[in-house]
């Protein structure tokens, strides 16, 4: 799957600090945590892993971890790292 040219995380990394400065009076801690998690998602800040096909073991290469990787059992959300060819 191809990634879009610009993702929400890109926007947060570029403009998030300025947004927080301007709107800190009404932003809640939970909202700041979500913004931080999204801006760190799929960067070296969260580490990485090797993607392999679940069926044949084909190596798809290295990927940075998603901010949702620990959430599968908690939220029933798939982070998209489980693949087959
Ligand atoms: Zn395979």
Image (cartoon, rainbow, N blue to C red):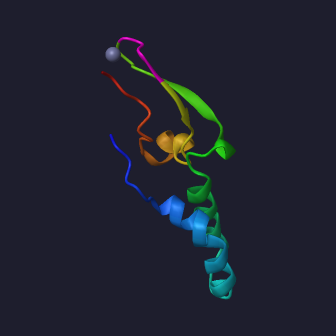
Specify the principal SS of the magenta part.
loop
- Which x, y percent locates residue 63? 53, 34
Q: Is residue 47 left or right of residue 4?
A: right
Residue sitting nearer the eye, 5 or 19: 5
Residue 2 x/y as whole percent: 34, 43
Where residue 84 appears, as percent x and y from the top left, is: 33, 23
Q: Quadrant of residue 57?
A: top left
User: Is 24 above or below relative to 16?
Assistant: below
**Above-or-below relation of 56 to 50:** above
Q: Which residues are magenta?
A: 56-60
Is 56 on the left-hand or right-hand side of 41?
Answer: left
Q: Residue at x 61, y 46 (%)?
A: 43
Decide: is 39 above or below 27: above
Residue 81 figure quarter: top left
Q: Is residue 51 above or below residue 17?
A: above
Residue under the image location 61 percent in, 34 percent down: 48
The residue at 32%/40% (across/down) is 1
């Amino acid at each position: 799957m191809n990634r879009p040219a610009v993702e929400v995380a890109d926007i947060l990394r570029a403009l998030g600090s300025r947004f927080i400065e301007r709107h800190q009076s009404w932003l809640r801690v939970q909202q700041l945590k979500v913004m931080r998690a999204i801006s760190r998602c799929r960067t070296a800040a969260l580490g990485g892993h090797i993607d392999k096909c679940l069926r044949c073991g084909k190596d798809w290469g290295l990927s940075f971890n998603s901010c949702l990787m620990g959430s599968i059992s908690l939220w029933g959300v798939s982070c998209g790292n489980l693949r087959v060819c």
